[in-house]
Structures are given as C-alpha cells and as structure tokens.
C-alpha cells in the first residue's frame, strides 16, 4: 500500500493507542465502521469502508475512495490521520486485514504492510517525484485558483475541497502535525526538502526557485555531512546488475558478471545511507535522523502525484486529461505557466521501484545475500527450471524499470557505461542540462 492507502487504513482501523492493539473483527456487510476510527467534530464521519482482505497482491483502495478522502471537508481530521499514521510507524505495528497487529506478532488476517523494521517510505521516492516539478506546478495552480478566477470556479465539491485541503495541509504558515518541516528555524519547506536530498544523496533538484524567472537556485543550507558519492555508487550498482542480468540469460560466450561485486556495492550503499540516519540499532523511526523530512516529503509528493495518476476530478476541471501520468502533468504545467520536467514520465516510472530497491538495501539480508541475488538475477530467464518466488521477479522487474528509465531521465548510459563522456551527470530539464548535478 502507498502512503495514501496507509492513511485511509489509519483512519478506519487504527486503535487510539497502537501499542495497545484492538483486534478488529473481519468486516461483515454492511461493513460497520471500525472502532476508534478518526472522525470530524464538525461534519459527518468518513464513509465506512471495509478493511481490505486481499491475499497475493498489493492492496490499494479504489481511486474514488482516495479522492473522497483527500477532499474530506475537515482538514483537521486529515491532520489527525497523518499524526495517527506517524505514530503507527513509530510503534512498529502491522496493518493487517483484520486490524492492527503489534510489533513481532503473528499476522491478524492477511498482512498488508509492516512497519516492524522501519517505514515503507524512502526519500529517493520524493526526490525523483519532485524533480518532475509537480509540487511547483500545483503550488502555482492553487495560488492562481485562490487569488483569481483564471481557471473558472470549481462547481465540483471534490475539486473545491481538495484545493482547500492542499493549502491547509501543505502551504499554511502554522502547521503543527508530523508532516511539518517548516518552523521559525526552517521557514521554507522547499529548502528543507532540498537540504534532506543533498544530505542523503548529494544531489540538488533539477530546477530552481518557483519565483525566479531565470530558474535561479533556491538558497538552502548545503550540509557538510552529505553522501556525495551516492550517485556514482548507485549507477555503478545498476550497471553491475545489468551485466549480471544479461549474463544470467547468456547460454554461450564469456560471463563478465561478478556477484560478489554486486553484493559489495549493495553493502556500500547500505552503509552510506544508514550513516545519514544515525543510530539504527533499536531506534524507532521517529528517532532516526531525517525521518520526519522523509515522511513529510513522501506525503506531499504522493498527495499531488495521486491527482495526476488518473483523470481525476482536478484533472478534468483543468481539462488536462491524458492516457499517461507524464502527459497530464505536462499539460497542467503548460496551463499554469511552469513547464514540467521533459522526462517526467520516466521519473514517475522510476520513483516507486527505486524506493523499493533502496529500502530493501537498507534493511539488509536480501540484496546483499549472494544466493538470493543469483536467484533474483535469473528470475526472468525463460524458461525457469523452477518457477521463482514472486518477490524475486518483482525485484528484477524493479531493477530493469530503474535502469531503462534512469538512462532516459539522465542521458547517462547504464547498460554500456564505457560509452559515457566523462564529466558531470545531470537530470536533464526539458532537454537542457540543469544546474543541479547528480554527482
């Protein structure tokens, strides 16, 4: 489940104190509301949805339910949902089909998502999504809508309430919930996210300040403690994965792959990323360095990405319908006067798989295990002698998705790195190399 799915689950299924589990019985038609779900003091409660009970697949709530949730008329209730979910993660609970299960307990029904080790979110997801310029585009749209009638008046209550909630949750001056990375010390949330990206990945965004006509860089603190070598190491890792993958499918000729190099690079990436998080030995998520920045960044980018993931009411209001997420954002960007990243479709494609890969690397015991990696690398070989487990196929599919789209977004060759011209690697903005280097 993505973060919006998890927020819906927290709304319907979380107990008041996740450390004291409330086992909610399986839903029975007409699906009575779970106990202790979050409600509004001012308007009728959320419609009662069944707690999902889906085996063998990644569950996601229906887009209509998600849209109704994001456009709920009381933003205070949404803020409480965000806070509830934050504490669920920190309490290391599991989201099961029959309710919350405490840390290290047997599944209560079908296991939907687990926070026993950490969150399921990764900062690389929001970094890649934000490079599409989606946040700046929707910030400008909301600004224009609230200050003028350039786009007309939204007669659809879902559109109107979504705009109001977006301003209240992400752009107000006095946020106080767990999604907040703005304060008197850090007055600009954009700069706070850029600082986190710089520290974790040694990378800036591919565009500057939203109010700069010349695309000048937004001033922010570039910390001394930063993973400057991340991009070099990550691209080398992807290149070795590709070589090992094609050699695993090779029935003749020399084998140029080395599984030990692949595993060693995963270990190096893990140590580099964990170094920025601080003490991971027994610390809960809230006590890890950059965890609040990560949670906030993934939340805001996912909130707006959901709106362009389909022809939502907001997309229809702007008359920017399309069959692809990238094309929708390009149309909206053109309408509000902020061009989306020319390779935004590739960035959207990369974000989820890259987050899954780096989250697994940080957790350890999978992508740094030689035997497991051999199975993953050969999982797509036709025909397999023994059908591989679905998770192995998923990892290899994620690797290929990242490799193929990384080349499109950066122009840097992963499959044939020897052909690269030595120098700075950059996420390209509309065909022009941006000021923010991937180095």
Image (cartoon, rainbow, N blue to C red):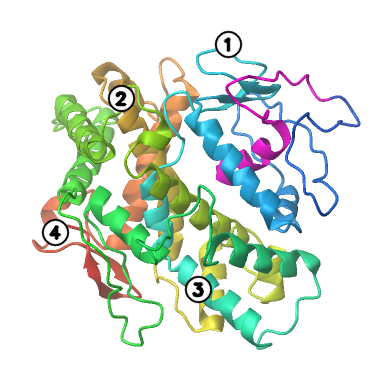
Mark 3 touches mark 4? (CB < 8 Å): no
- Magenta span of residues: 1-27
Neighbour class for label 3 at 10 Å: few (<14), some, many (≥20)?
many
Image height of 216 relative to 297, above or below: below
Neighbour class for label 1 at 10 Å: few (<14), some, many (≥20)?
few
Q: CA distance from mark 1 to mark 4?
A: 50 Å
Chain-order first, disc 2 or disc 1: 1
Residue 26 falls inside the magenta stretch:
yes
Q: Residue shown at 59%/33% (left/top)?
A: 58
Q: Please give the label number shown on residue 106.
A: 1
Labels 2, 4: front one = 2
Q: CA distance from mark 1 to mark 3?
A: 44 Å
Neighbour class for label 4 at 10 Å: few (<14), some, many (≥20)?
few
Chain-order first, disc 3 or disc 4: 3
Residue hosting label 2: 364
Q: Residue shown at 54%/34% (left/top)?
A: 87
**Secondary structure beneath disc 3?**
helix
């Amino acid at each position: 489940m993505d973060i919006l799915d998890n927020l819906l689950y927290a709304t319907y299924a979380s107990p008041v104190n996740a450390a004291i589990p409330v086992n909610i019985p399986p839903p029975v038609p007409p699906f009575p509301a779970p106990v202790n779900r979050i409600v509004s003091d001012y308007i009728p409660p959320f419609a009662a949805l069944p707690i999902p009970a889906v085996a063998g697949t990644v569950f996601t709530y229906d887009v209509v339910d998600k849209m109704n949730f994001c456009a709920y008329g009381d933003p205070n209730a949404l803020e409480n949902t965000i806070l509830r979910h934050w504490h669920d993660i920190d309490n290391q609970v599991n989201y099961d089909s029959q309710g919350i299960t405490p840390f290290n307990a047997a599944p209560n029904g079908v296991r939907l998502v687990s926070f026993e080790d950490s969150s399921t979110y990764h900062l690389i997801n929001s970094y890649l999504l934000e490079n599409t310029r989606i946040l700046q585009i929707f910030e400008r749209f909301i600004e224009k809508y609230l200050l003028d009638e350039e786009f007309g008046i939204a007669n659809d209550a879902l559109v109107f309430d979504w705009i109001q909630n977006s301003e209240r949750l992400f752009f107000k001056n006095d946020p106080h919930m767990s999604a907040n990375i703005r304060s008197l010390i850090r007055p600009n949330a954009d700069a706070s996210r850029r600082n986190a990206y710089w520290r974790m990945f040694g990378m800036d965004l591919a565009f500057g300040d939203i109010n700069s006509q010349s695309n000048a860089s937004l001033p922010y603190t570039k910390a001394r403690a930063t993973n400057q070598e991340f991009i070099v190491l990550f691209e080398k890792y992807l290149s070795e994965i590709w070589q090992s993958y094609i050699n695993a499918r090779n029935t003749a000729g020399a084998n140029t792959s080395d599984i030990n190099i692949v595993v060693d690079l995963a270990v190096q990436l893990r140590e580099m990323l964990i170094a920025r998080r601080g003490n991971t030995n027994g610390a809960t998520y809230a006590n890890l360095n950059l965890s609040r920045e990560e949670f906030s960044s993934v939340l805001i980018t996912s909130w707006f990405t959901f709106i362009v993931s389909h022809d939502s009411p907001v997309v229809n209001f702007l008359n920017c319908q399309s069959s692809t997420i990238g094309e929708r954002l390009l149309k909206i960007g053109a309408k509000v006067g902020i061009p989306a990243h020319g390779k935004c479709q590739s960035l959207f494609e990369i974000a989820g798989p890259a987050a899954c890969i780096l989250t697994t690397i940080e957790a350890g015991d999978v992508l740094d295990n030689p035997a497991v990696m051999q199975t993953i690398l050969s999982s797509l070989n036709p025909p397999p002698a023994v059908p591989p487990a679905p998770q192995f196929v998923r990892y290899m599919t994620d690797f290929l998705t990242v490799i193929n789209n990384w080349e499109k977004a950066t122009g840097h060759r992963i499959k044939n790195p020897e052909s690269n011209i030595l120098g700075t690697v950059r996420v390209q903005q509309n065909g022009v190399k941006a000021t923010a280097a991937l180095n």
